[in-house]
Amino acid sequence: MSEVVTPFTLLIIEDDLDVAEMLATFFKEQGYRVLTANWGEDGIRTATEQLPHLVILDIRLPDIDGFEVARRLRARRRTRYIPIIFLTEKRERQDKLQGLQLEADDYITKPFDIRELGLRVRNALSRARRESLTHPVTGLPQGALVEEALAHWLATYPALSLWVVGLRHLEAFREAYGFVAADDALRAVALLLGRQLLDAADDSAFLGHLDLTTFVLIVTAGPRSGLGERLARQLDQALGLFYRSEDLQEGRFEGSRLSVVLRSFAPSTLPDSVAGLRAALLELVEARGA
């Protein structure tokens, strides 16, 4: 098995000290950074604080079982999308189904071939890396794909216009209604923005994420096209539907209701490097929304 080039971090949650040491030694030799925990609660704490790229998780642990560990990791936004490989003596079909229901990336029973485990870890990381190019909630491009689009805009302006849409107060909404409702609201904004692109039949258009709550929209329509006013009106109407009417009537979210900050930009007002441009866009939208 070839050595890992990128220093991925693995977290091994295993109460058998001999197995944990054997796994740690093997993966360190492959170029990984390895963290270990022998108790479920310790594993959750380590995953939350250090955000490993993948977790190898035993099911039988001294305090809480691996299913509960996985359930808590999936329930927290910070650790929700970390790939998990169950490593266990449990061979029953029901146990495997329970692991898959918790969105485990793989399920390996003991005894196991460590080189096979190494290949499964590599494949899971490769899948996660590919998926990191798209946002897990909206499915829109992010990361390197957005940077490529920004570079294209810098090179082709004024043929294309750049708009940034920032969704404000999503955290307050999530605390009140839960992460599922918050994901639905974020997805609704993405769908509405995407619909604008379809309606415009703009082959040059691009829509992606600058960060979790900030979208970048690159289209031919400029600031005087009326696009900004239409989007602001439609988004405000759509976001209002996510609240319970009694909450709005009682003014519960006064000053912290979901809303958008929408701006268009010209290169002359921004840095000419992609990294500088991305940072400046986020800073300007944040300042506008404050």
Image (cartoon, grey):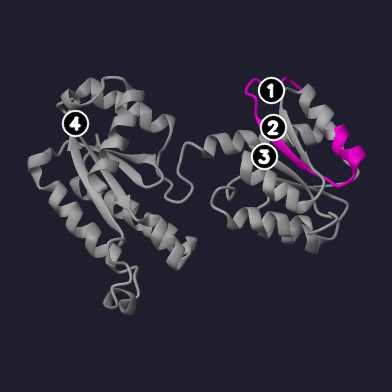
Q: Tell me whether circle 3 and circle 2 mark residues in contact (CB < 8 Å).
A: no
Disc 1 residue type?
Answer: Val
Camera-side residue: 205 or 29? 29
Residue positioned 77% across, 55% down in the render: 66
Q: Which badge, 4 or 1, comes first in the chain's sequence?
A: 1
Span highlighted in magenta in the image? 1-22
Gap between marks 2 and 1 measured at Cα:
8 Å
Disc 2 residue type?
Answer: Arg
Position of 88 with respect to 49 (left or right) is right
Q: Which badge, 2 or 4, comes first in the chain's sequence?
A: 2
Q: Which badge, 3 or 2, comes first in the chain's sequence?
A: 3
Seen in the picture, residue 38 relative to 7 is either above or below; the reply is below
Circle 4 sits on which residue? 160
Disc 3 residue type?
Answer: Leu
Q: Quadrant of the N terminus?
A: top right
Circle 3 sits on which residue? 54
Image coordinates of residue 67 in percent, x first then y, are: 74, 58
Residue positioned 56% across, 34% down in the render: 129
* Label 3 vs label 2, nearer the camera: 3
Circle 1 sits on which residue? 4
Q: Which badge, 4 or 3, comes first in the chain's sequence?
A: 3
Gap between marks 4 and 1 measured at Cα:
40 Å
Q: Which mark is residue 122?
A: 2
Image coordinates of residue 15 in percent, x first then y, are: 86, 47
Position of 222 with respect to 280 (left or right) is left
Q: Tell me whether circle 2 and circle 1 mark residues in contact (CB < 8 Å).
A: yes
